[in-house]
Protein backbone atom coordinates (compact mmCIF):
# COMPACT_ATOMS: atom_id res chain seq x y z
CA UNK A 1 0.00 0.00 0.00
CA UNK A 2 1.39 3.40 -1.02
CA UNK A 3 1.93 6.28 1.42
CA UNK A 4 -0.87 8.27 -0.28
CA UNK A 5 -3.34 5.41 0.10
CA UNK A 6 -2.33 4.96 3.73
CA UNK A 7 -2.91 8.68 4.40
CA UNK A 8 -6.30 8.52 2.66
CA UNK A 9 -7.32 5.52 4.75
CA UNK A 10 -6.35 7.29 7.96
CA UNK A 11 -8.29 10.37 6.91
CA UNK A 12 -11.29 8.22 6.02
CA UNK A 13 -11.10 6.46 9.39
CA UNK A 14 -11.00 9.80 11.21
CA UNK A 15 -14.00 11.07 9.26
CA UNK A 16 -15.97 7.92 10.07
CA UNK A 17 -14.96 8.24 13.73
CA UNK A 18 -16.04 11.85 14.18
CA UNK A 19 -18.89 12.03 11.66
CA UNK A 20 -21.62 10.72 14.02
CA UNK A 21 -20.61 13.26 16.68
CA UNK A 22 -20.51 16.05 14.11
CA UNK A 23 -23.94 15.13 12.78
CA UNK A 24 -25.34 14.93 16.30
CA UNK A 25 -23.93 18.37 17.12
CA UNK A 26 -25.33 19.83 13.88
CA UNK A 27 -28.76 18.43 14.70
CA UNK A 28 -28.57 19.63 18.30
CA UNK A 29 -27.25 23.11 17.49
CA UNK A 30 -29.57 23.38 14.50
CA UNK A 31 -32.62 22.74 16.64
CA UNK A 32 -31.49 25.25 19.26
CA UNK A 33 -30.70 27.86 16.60
CA UNK A 34 -34.11 27.34 15.03
CA UNK A 35 -35.66 27.76 18.46
CA UNK A 36 -33.61 30.91 19.03
CA UNK A 37 -34.66 32.40 15.69
CA UNK A 38 -38.30 31.59 16.43
CA UNK A 39 -37.95 33.25 19.83
CA UNK A 40 -36.52 36.40 18.25
CA UNK A 41 -39.41 36.46 15.77
CA UNK A 42 -41.78 36.21 18.72
CA UNK A 43 -40.02 39.10 20.45
CA UNK A 44 -40.06 41.16 17.24
CA UNK A 45 -43.82 40.70 16.88
CA UNK A 46 -44.46 41.59 20.51
CA UNK A 47 -42.11 44.61 20.34
CA UNK A 48 -43.95 46.04 17.34
CA UNK A 49 -47.52 45.37 18.45
CA UNK A 50 -47.22 46.02 22.19
CA UNK A 51 -45.20 49.20 21.76
CA UNK A 52 -42.15 50.34 23.71
CA UNK A 53 -43.92 50.94 27.03
CA UNK A 54 -45.86 47.66 27.19
CA UNK A 55 -42.94 45.69 25.78
CA UNK A 56 -40.61 47.19 28.41
CA UNK A 57 -43.03 45.93 31.08
CA UNK A 58 -42.99 42.50 29.43
CA UNK A 59 -39.18 42.45 29.60
CA UNK A 60 -39.39 43.30 33.31
CA UNK A 61 -41.78 40.45 34.18
CA UNK A 62 -39.68 38.06 32.07
CA UNK A 63 -36.59 39.08 34.05
CA UNK A 64 -38.36 38.36 37.34
CA UNK A 65 -39.84 35.00 36.32
CA UNK A 66 -36.58 33.85 34.72
CA UNK A 67 -35.12 33.89 38.23
CA UNK A 68 -38.06 32.00 39.70
CA UNK A 69 -38.08 29.26 37.04
CA UNK A 70 -34.62 28.13 38.19
CA UNK A 71 -35.92 27.81 41.75
CA UNK A 72 -38.91 25.76 40.59
CA UNK A 73 -38.04 22.05 40.76
CA UNK A 74 -34.92 22.69 42.87
CA UNK A 75 -32.52 21.20 40.33
CA UNK A 76 -34.46 17.97 39.90
CA UNK A 77 -34.12 17.95 36.11
CA UNK A 78 -30.33 17.59 36.29
CA UNK A 79 -30.66 14.73 38.76
CA UNK A 80 -33.04 13.02 36.35
CA UNK A 81 -30.74 13.57 33.37
CA UNK A 82 -27.63 12.35 35.18
CA UNK A 83 -29.20 9.32 36.89
CA UNK A 84 -31.16 8.18 33.83
CA UNK A 85 -28.05 8.53 31.63
CA UNK A 86 -26.34 6.07 33.99
CA UNK A 87 -29.31 3.73 34.55
CA UNK A 88 -32.61 4.10 32.65
CA UNK A 89 -34.48 1.85 35.10
CA UNK A 90 -34.57 4.68 37.64
CA UNK A 91 -36.53 6.93 35.25
CA UNK A 92 -40.04 6.45 36.79
CA UNK A 93 -38.77 7.35 40.27
CA UNK A 94 -36.83 10.37 39.01
CA UNK A 95 -39.83 11.59 37.00
CA UNK A 96 -42.06 11.39 40.08
CA UNK A 97 -39.34 13.08 42.14
CA UNK A 98 -39.34 15.99 39.68
CA UNK A 99 -43.12 16.35 39.56
CA UNK A 100 -43.34 16.52 43.36
CA UNK A 101 -40.64 19.21 43.57
CA UNK A 102 -42.15 21.25 40.73
CA UNK A 103 -45.62 21.14 42.32
CA UNK A 104 -44.47 22.21 45.78
CA UNK A 105 -41.89 24.84 44.81
CA UNK A 106 -44.03 26.18 41.95
CA UNK A 107 -47.03 26.73 44.20
CA UNK A 108 -44.94 28.57 46.77
CA UNK A 109 -43.38 30.79 44.11
CA UNK A 110 -46.76 31.73 42.65
CA UNK A 111 -48.14 32.65 46.06
CA UNK A 112 -45.04 34.73 46.83
CA UNK A 113 -45.30 36.46 43.47
CA UNK A 114 -48.96 37.32 43.93
CA UNK A 115 -48.21 38.86 47.33
CA UNK A 116 -45.07 40.82 46.40
CA UNK A 117 -45.06 41.75 42.72
CA UNK A 118 -48.15 44.05 42.63
CA UNK A 119 -45.98 46.59 44.47
CA UNK A 120 -43.42 46.40 41.65
CA UNK A 121 -45.26 45.89 38.35
CA UNK A 122 -48.67 46.89 37.08
CA UNK A 123 -50.26 45.55 33.91
CA UNK A 124 -53.58 47.36 34.13
CA UNK A 125 -55.35 50.13 36.05
CA UNK A 126 -58.08 47.63 36.93
CA UNK A 127 -56.96 45.70 40.07
CA UNK A 128 -58.75 42.48 39.07
CA UNK A 129 -57.22 42.49 35.57
CA UNK A 130 -53.84 43.24 37.07
CA UNK A 131 -53.98 40.26 39.49
CA UNK A 132 -55.29 37.87 36.83
CA UNK A 133 -52.55 38.91 34.39
CA UNK A 134 -49.90 38.53 37.07
CA UNK A 135 -51.18 35.06 38.01
CA UNK A 136 -51.16 33.98 34.35
CA UNK A 137 -47.59 35.18 33.85
CA UNK A 138 -46.41 33.43 37.02
CA UNK A 139 -47.99 30.05 36.33
CA UNK A 140 -46.94 30.22 32.67
CA UNK A 141 -43.33 31.35 33.02
CA UNK A 142 -42.57 29.29 36.13
CA UNK A 143 -44.58 26.07 36.47
CA UNK A 144 -45.64 25.36 32.88
CA UNK A 145 -42.25 26.36 31.51
CA UNK A 146 -40.46 24.10 34.00
CA UNK A 147 -42.69 21.17 33.00
CA UNK A 148 -41.98 21.80 29.31
CA UNK A 149 -38.22 21.98 29.90
CA UNK A 150 -38.41 18.71 31.83
CA UNK A 151 -39.32 16.88 28.61
CA UNK A 152 -36.03 17.90 27.03
CA UNK A 153 -34.07 16.65 30.06
CA UNK A 154 -35.92 13.31 29.96
CA UNK A 155 -35.00 12.62 26.35
CA UNK A 156 -31.40 13.74 26.75
CA UNK A 157 -31.14 11.37 29.71
CA UNK A 158 -32.35 8.57 27.43
CA UNK A 159 -29.85 9.72 24.75
CA UNK A 160 -32.78 10.36 22.42
CA UNK A 161 -31.45 13.63 21.03
CA UNK A 162 -33.88 13.66 18.12
CA UNK A 163 -36.86 13.80 20.47
CA UNK A 164 -35.07 16.39 22.64
CA UNK A 165 -34.44 18.56 19.60
CA UNK A 166 -38.04 18.25 18.48
CA UNK A 167 -39.27 19.31 21.91
CA UNK A 168 -37.15 22.48 21.79
CA UNK A 169 -38.14 23.43 18.25
CA UNK A 170 -41.81 22.55 18.75
CA UNK A 171 -42.08 24.74 21.84
CA UNK A 172 -40.38 27.70 20.12
CA UNK A 173 -42.60 27.46 17.06
CA UNK A 174 -45.70 27.17 19.24
CA UNK A 175 -44.84 30.47 20.97
CA UNK A 176 -44.21 32.17 17.63
CA UNK A 177 -47.51 30.89 16.26
CA UNK A 178 -49.28 32.16 19.39
CA UNK A 179 -47.73 35.63 18.92
CA UNK A 180 -48.75 35.72 15.25
CA UNK A 181 -52.26 34.62 16.08
CA UNK A 182 -52.65 36.99 19.03
CA UNK A 183 -51.06 40.15 17.67
CA UNK A 184 -51.51 39.94 13.91
CA UNK A 185 -54.76 37.98 13.61
CA UNK A 186 -56.62 39.21 16.72
CA UNK A 187 -54.93 42.59 17.25
CA UNK A 188 -53.71 42.07 20.82
CA UNK A 189 -51.73 45.19 21.82
CA UNK A 190 -51.61 45.03 25.63
CA UNK A 191 -49.51 42.92 27.97
CA UNK A 192 -52.62 41.80 29.86
CA UNK A 193 -54.09 40.51 26.59
CA UNK A 194 -50.87 38.67 25.73
CA UNK A 195 -50.85 37.01 29.17
CA UNK A 196 -53.88 34.89 28.17
CA UNK A 197 -52.43 33.84 24.83
CA UNK A 198 -49.06 32.92 26.35
CA UNK A 199 -50.78 30.90 29.09
CA UNK A 200 -52.91 28.92 26.62
CA UNK A 201 -49.89 28.26 24.40
CA UNK A 202 -47.78 26.92 27.28
CA UNK A 203 -50.69 24.87 28.64
CA UNK A 204 -51.23 23.20 25.26
CA UNK A 205 -47.51 22.40 24.81
CA UNK A 206 -47.17 21.08 28.39
CA UNK A 207 -50.20 18.78 27.92
CA UNK A 208 -48.87 17.49 24.58
CA UNK A 209 -45.41 16.83 26.00
CA UNK A 210 -46.90 15.04 29.03
CA UNK A 211 -48.75 12.62 26.74
CA UNK A 212 -45.52 12.21 24.80
CA UNK A 213 -43.55 11.31 27.93
CA UNK A 214 -46.06 8.69 29.04
CA UNK A 215 -44.70 6.38 26.33
CA UNK A 216 -41.53 6.04 28.41
CA UNK A 217 -43.35 5.00 31.56
CA UNK A 218 -45.55 6.43 34.30
CA UNK A 219 -43.99 8.28 37.23
CA UNK A 220 -43.53 6.77 40.67
CA UNK A 221 -44.32 9.56 43.09
CA UNK A 222 -41.63 9.50 45.74
CA UNK A 223 -38.74 11.72 46.71
CA UNK A 224 -35.28 10.39 45.91
CA UNK A 225 -33.77 11.80 49.10
CA UNK A 226 -30.11 11.47 48.17
CA UNK A 227 -30.74 13.74 45.17
CA UNK A 228 -32.31 16.59 47.15
CA UNK A 229 -28.97 18.01 48.29
CA UNK A 230 -27.33 17.50 44.89
CA UNK A 231 -30.31 19.09 43.17
CA UNK A 232 -30.08 22.10 45.45
CA UNK A 233 -26.36 22.40 44.73
CA UNK A 234 -27.11 22.22 41.02
CA UNK A 235 -29.96 24.75 41.12
CA UNK A 236 -28.36 27.45 43.26
CA UNK A 237 -25.77 28.51 40.63
CA UNK A 238 -28.56 28.99 38.10
CA UNK A 239 -30.63 30.92 40.63
CA UNK A 240 -27.83 33.27 41.59
CA UNK A 241 -26.74 33.57 37.97
CA UNK A 242 -30.29 34.49 36.96
CA UNK A 243 -30.34 37.14 39.70
CA UNK A 244 -27.01 38.49 38.52
CA UNK A 245 -28.05 38.41 34.86
CA UNK A 246 -31.36 40.17 35.44
CA UNK A 247 -30.50 42.73 38.09
CA UNK A 248 -29.22 45.03 35.36
CA UNK A 249 -32.56 44.76 33.53
CA UNK A 250 -34.47 45.59 36.70
CA UNK A 251 -32.26 48.58 37.57
CA UNK A 252 -32.07 49.93 34.03
CA UNK A 253 -35.86 49.74 33.97
CA UNK A 254 -35.86 52.27 36.81
CA UNK A 255 -33.13 54.50 35.32
CA UNK A 256 -33.80 54.54 31.58
CA UNK A 257 -36.82 54.99 29.29
CA UNK A 258 -39.06 52.04 28.33
CA UNK A 259 -37.79 52.14 24.73
CA UNK A 260 -34.17 51.84 25.90
CA UNK A 261 -34.91 49.04 28.35
CA UNK A 262 -36.81 47.28 25.57
CA UNK A 263 -33.76 47.59 23.28
CA UNK A 264 -31.39 46.43 26.01
CA UNK A 265 -33.70 43.56 26.92
CA UNK A 266 -33.83 42.28 23.35
CA UNK A 267 -30.06 42.70 22.94
CA UNK A 268 -29.58 40.65 26.10
CA UNK A 269 -32.00 38.05 24.79
CA UNK A 270 -30.06 37.82 21.52
CA UNK A 271 -26.76 37.38 23.36
CA UNK A 272 -28.27 34.86 25.77
CA UNK A 273 -29.70 32.97 22.80
CA UNK A 274 -26.23 32.81 21.28
CA UNK A 275 -25.23 30.62 24.23
CA UNK A 276 -27.39 27.93 22.68
CA UNK A 277 -24.56 26.97 20.32
CA UNK A 278 -22.46 26.12 23.36
CA UNK A 279 -25.39 24.50 25.16
CA UNK A 280 -25.97 22.30 22.09
CA UNK A 281 -22.50 20.85 22.53
CA UNK A 282 -23.02 20.48 26.29
CA UNK A 283 -26.25 18.53 25.71
CA UNK A 284 -24.32 15.97 23.71
CA UNK A 285 -21.28 15.84 25.98
CA UNK A 286 -22.94 15.77 29.40
CA UNK A 287 -24.02 12.10 29.24
CA UNK A 288 -20.51 11.21 28.00
CA UNK A 289 -18.88 13.19 30.80
CA UNK A 290 -21.16 11.41 33.29
CA UNK A 291 -20.19 7.96 32.02
CA UNK A 292 -16.47 8.72 31.71
CA UNK A 293 -16.22 10.31 35.16
CA UNK A 294 -18.04 7.45 36.92
CA UNK A 295 -14.60 6.04 37.80
CA UNK A 296 -13.00 9.42 38.53
CA UNK A 297 -13.19 12.93 37.15
CA UNK A 298 -9.68 12.59 35.72
CA UNK A 299 -11.05 10.15 33.14
CA UNK A 300 -13.04 13.01 31.57
CA UNK A 301 -10.05 15.41 31.44
CA UNK A 302 -8.89 14.57 27.86
CA UNK A 303 -12.40 15.12 26.51
CA UNK A 304 -12.73 18.35 28.52
CA UNK A 305 -9.58 19.75 26.90
CA UNK A 306 -10.83 18.97 23.40
CA UNK A 307 -14.28 20.30 24.24
CA UNK A 308 -13.10 23.72 25.43
CA UNK A 309 -11.17 24.27 22.18
CA UNK A 310 -14.29 23.47 20.17
CA UNK A 311 -16.47 25.60 22.44
CA UNK A 312 -14.24 28.69 22.10
CA UNK A 313 -14.14 28.28 18.32
CA UNK A 314 -17.91 28.09 18.16
CA UNK A 315 -18.18 31.12 20.47
CA UNK A 316 -15.88 33.31 18.36
CA UNK A 317 -17.73 32.43 15.18
CA UNK A 318 -21.10 33.16 16.81
CA UNK A 319 -19.93 36.52 18.21
CA UNK A 320 -18.63 37.65 14.81
CA UNK A 321 -21.93 36.75 13.14
CA UNK A 322 -23.99 38.61 15.76
CA UNK A 323 -21.75 41.69 15.52
CA UNK A 324 -22.18 41.78 11.75
CA UNK A 325 -25.95 41.34 11.85
CA UNK A 326 -26.62 43.86 14.66
CA UNK A 327 -27.10 46.93 12.38
CA UNK A 328 -30.04 45.22 10.70
CA UNK A 329 -32.01 44.52 13.90
CA UNK A 330 -34.10 47.75 13.85
CA UNK A 331 -35.49 46.63 10.50
CA UNK A 332 -37.05 43.71 12.35
CA UNK A 333 -38.00 45.25 15.70
CA UNK A 334 -38.80 48.82 14.64
CA UNK A 335 -37.02 52.18 14.42
CA UNK A 336 -37.73 53.04 18.07
CA UNK A 337 -35.21 50.35 19.05
CA UNK A 338 -32.10 51.94 17.44
CA UNK A 339 -29.98 51.64 20.60
CA UNK A 340 -30.26 47.87 20.22
CA UNK A 341 -27.39 47.96 17.69
CA UNK A 342 -24.88 49.37 20.18
CA UNK A 343 -26.04 47.12 23.03
CA UNK A 344 -25.78 43.98 20.90
CA UNK A 345 -22.34 44.73 19.46
CA UNK A 346 -20.89 45.47 22.88
CA UNK A 347 -22.33 42.39 24.58
CA UNK A 348 -21.89 39.74 21.86
CA UNK A 349 -18.30 38.87 22.88
CA UNK A 350 -19.41 37.68 26.33
CA UNK A 351 -20.18 34.28 24.79
CA UNK A 352 -16.42 33.52 24.62
CA UNK A 353 -16.08 33.63 28.40
CA UNK A 354 -19.31 31.65 28.77
CA UNK A 355 -17.84 28.95 26.52
CA UNK A 356 -14.73 28.78 28.67
CA UNK A 357 -16.40 28.26 32.04
CA UNK A 358 -19.41 26.24 30.85
CA UNK A 359 -17.24 23.29 29.79
CA UNK A 360 -15.45 23.21 33.14
CA UNK A 361 -18.63 23.29 35.22
CA UNK A 362 -20.32 20.71 33.00
CA UNK A 363 -17.49 18.28 33.75
CA UNK A 364 -17.84 18.94 37.49
CA UNK A 365 -21.60 18.48 37.36
CA UNK A 366 -21.40 15.26 35.37
CA UNK A 367 -18.85 13.91 37.85
CA UNK A 368 -21.17 14.66 40.78
CA UNK A 369 -18.88 17.42 42.09
CA UNK A 370 -21.81 19.76 42.62
CA UNK A 371 -20.33 21.25 45.76
CA UNK A 372 -17.32 22.66 43.90
CA UNK A 373 -19.47 23.62 40.94
CA UNK A 374 -21.93 25.46 43.17
CA UNK A 375 -19.13 27.16 45.13
CA UNK A 376 -17.56 28.59 41.97
CA UNK A 377 -20.75 29.77 40.29
CA UNK A 378 -22.49 30.90 43.46
CA UNK A 379 -19.50 32.91 44.62
CA UNK A 380 -19.15 34.53 41.21
CA UNK A 381 -22.82 35.36 41.01
CA UNK A 382 -23.30 36.41 44.66
CA UNK A 383 -20.31 38.72 44.51
CA UNK A 384 -21.06 39.72 40.95
CA UNK A 385 -24.67 40.77 41.52
CA UNK A 386 -23.90 43.73 43.84
CA UNK A 387 -20.93 44.73 41.64
CA UNK A 388 -23.19 44.72 38.59
CA UNK A 389 -25.93 46.58 40.45
CA UNK A 390 -23.55 49.27 41.73
CA UNK A 391 -21.87 49.73 38.35
CA UNK A 392 -25.27 49.94 36.64
CA UNK A 393 -26.51 52.49 39.16
CA UNK A 394 -23.39 54.68 38.89
CA UNK A 395 -22.70 54.49 35.14
CA UNK A 396 -25.66 53.14 33.15
CA UNK A 397 -25.09 51.37 30.81
CA UNK A 398 -21.26 51.59 30.47
CA UNK A 399 -20.70 50.33 34.01
CA UNK A 400 -23.06 47.45 33.24
CA UNK A 401 -20.93 46.30 30.31
CA UNK A 402 -17.60 46.54 32.17
CA UNK A 403 -18.88 44.58 35.18
CA UNK A 404 -20.44 41.84 33.01
CA UNK A 405 -17.12 41.11 31.29
CA UNK A 406 -15.19 41.24 34.57
CA UNK A 407 -17.57 38.76 36.23
CA UNK A 408 -17.57 36.29 33.33
CA UNK A 409 -13.76 36.34 33.08
CA UNK A 410 -13.39 35.73 36.83
CA UNK A 411 -15.79 32.76 36.76
CA UNK A 412 -13.97 31.20 33.80
CA UNK A 413 -10.57 31.50 35.51
CA UNK A 414 -11.78 30.01 38.79
CA UNK A 415 -13.69 27.18 37.08
CA UNK A 416 -10.62 25.87 35.26
CA UNK A 417 -8.34 26.25 38.27
CA UNK A 418 -10.72 24.17 40.40
CA UNK A 419 -11.29 21.58 37.68
CA UNK A 420 -7.54 21.12 37.25
CA UNK A 421 -7.21 20.69 41.01
CA UNK A 422 -9.95 18.02 41.09
CA UNK A 423 -8.39 16.17 38.16
CA UNK A 424 -4.95 16.18 39.81
CA UNK A 425 -6.41 14.92 43.06
CA UNK A 426 -8.36 12.11 41.34
CA UNK A 427 -5.33 11.04 39.34
CA UNK A 428 -3.23 10.57 42.48
CA UNK A 429 -5.81 8.56 44.47
Image: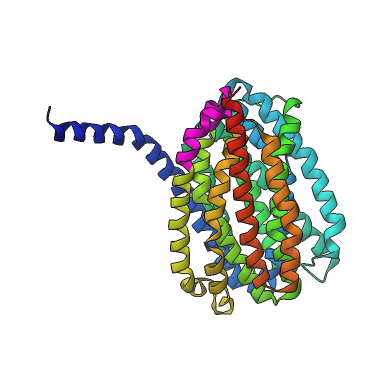
Residue 213 at x, y = what percent? 59, 33
- Residues drawn in magenta: 288-307
Residue at 80% in and 44% down = 107
User: From the image, which quarter does the N terminus lie in?
Assistant: top left
User: Where, by quadrant of the figure, is residue 98 drawn?
Assistant: top right
The quadrant of the picture occupied by the C terminus is: top right
Vertical arrangement, residue 68 with respect to residue 128, above or below: above
**Is 248 in the magenta?**
no
110 relative position to 196: left or right: right
Q: Considering depth in this image, is 313 or 52 the residue closer to the camera?
A: 313
Query: Which of 232 and 328 lies nearest the eye of the viewer?
Result: 232
Residue in the image at 62% along x and 33% along y: 422
Q: Main secondary structure of the magenta part?
A: helix
x and y, in percent, of residue 59 in the image: 67, 64
- Horizontal side, residue 291 vs residue 254: left or right: left
Q: Whole-percent x and y of residue 353?
A: 56, 54
Q: Position of residue 185 (x, y in %)?
A: 56, 66
Quarter-of-image position of residue 264: bottom right
| Depicted 251 relative to depicted 151: above or below | below
Amino acid sequence: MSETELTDNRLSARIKRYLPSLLSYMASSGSLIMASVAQLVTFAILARFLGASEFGMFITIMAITSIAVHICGIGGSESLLRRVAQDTSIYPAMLGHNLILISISGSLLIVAGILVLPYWVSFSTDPLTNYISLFLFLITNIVLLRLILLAEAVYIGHSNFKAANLSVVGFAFARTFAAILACIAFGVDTISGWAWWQFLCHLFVAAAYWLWLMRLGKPKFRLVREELKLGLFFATPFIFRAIRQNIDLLLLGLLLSPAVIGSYGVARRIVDSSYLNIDAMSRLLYPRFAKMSANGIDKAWPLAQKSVVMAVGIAIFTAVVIYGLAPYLPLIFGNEYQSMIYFTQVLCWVIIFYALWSVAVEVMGAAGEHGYRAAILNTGNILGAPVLALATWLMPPTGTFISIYLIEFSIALCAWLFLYKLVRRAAHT
